[in-house]
Image (cartoon, coloured by chain):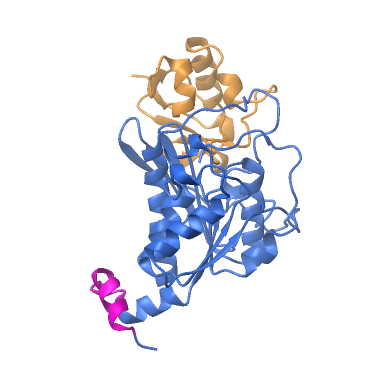
Amino acid sequence: MAVVVRIPTPLQRLTSGQSEVQCEGQTVTELLADLERRYPGIKERICDQDGKLRRFVNVFVNEEDIRFLQGDQTAVKAGDEVSIIPAIAGGALAR
Amino acid sequence: MGLSKDQVARYSRQLLLPQIGPRGQQRLAESSVLIVGAGGLGSPVALYLAAAGVGTLGLIDDQVVELSNLHRQLLHTAADVGRPKVDSASAQLAARNPEVRLLARLQRLTAANARELVREHDVIVDGSDNVPTRYVVNDACVMEHRPLVHGGVIEYEGQLFVVRPGQSACLRCIFPEPPEAGGALRCEEAGVLGSAAGVIGSLMAHETLKLLLGLGEPLTDRLLVFEGAAGRFRDVPVQRDPACAVCGETPSIRDVADDANACVSQRVHV
């Protein structure tokens, strides 16, 4: 069983309209790399050029903000649910 | 001061609520709310707050009504196209509830005027249409210790939360920096379904009334996400960031500033 990644609406263009996708990895970093393999182009919306999570995008593992866990090294396991939640500021949102 | 016969009739359905009653109604009448943006979010916010009898509503918006606003901005009608939004909004609100005092400002909320404006009101509701203003409003509310009801909407999706400065997570605790100009972010129109703005705007009005009345639990330290396409709400816990640049232990932002790096072209989705 893989990790379920929930995709915000504006990024669903890159996942063929799917709001939830399955990915594999031991950490958030690995998970995002796998997400990029499956849906090319999605990672640059979530991470900057150095691969760091953009500061207006939050990632939650089972509804816990990874900034208050181990950041992108936060461990994930099969069955976990990971949500990507960008700031929506009156339409200002990574898309 | 007691309620008039007309007031008893007008507000009867909310006076019936035991947590409101005449005392709560009086409290609303003595309250003042600043609504930033008279658009897709500001419309339901202003309509519900005026209807509920909030005594003073400050409206600030520098735009005129366009035909493309009408599918979601219910304060304005086809006859208002070309008219300043604060004017058409004031007319609609006065027609709905003549008792409400309206302070309409045909201008933009900026770093220069934000703190003074915020200070004049009890609760601030941010329905603005661009990122820099969002951070200006947040920072001004933190510095002036005014509760903020923050909401955003795009496509079929929205989110909202309440900030109690010094007590709960602020916008910068949750999203430390605005999206930068350029980069991978595309500052283009994404579109929005009017009813999604209605959902978030109505919830913002609801949270505002709760704050004014001291009712229930405010939506603090939680990000309520409306996944409109899926028809689902998600309630995501968030927390204050001790390193927050504006409300953290050693804030680096000590006065409100316009952020020149933010993506200024992202406008008019609300």
Depth check, front residue: B174 or B249: B174
- Residues B41 and B87: in front is B87
Magenta part of the protein: which range?
A: B3-21
Q: Residue at x 36, y 76 (%)?
A: B25
Q: Residue furthest bottom?
A: B1
Q: Is residue B219 visible?
A: no
- What's the residue at 51%, 25% (across, down)? A27
Q: Check residue B98 for magenta coloring.
A: no
Residue at 61%, 20% in the rendered image: A44
Q: x, y percentage for residue B105? A: 62, 59
Colour of the chain lettered B: blue
* x, y percent for residue B102: 52, 66
Q: Is B192 situated above or below B106? A: above
Does the segment drawn in magenta span residue B11?
yes
For image coordinates 69% across by 33% down, the residue present is: B180
Q: Colour of chain A?
A: orange
Specify whether B36 is left or right of B229: right
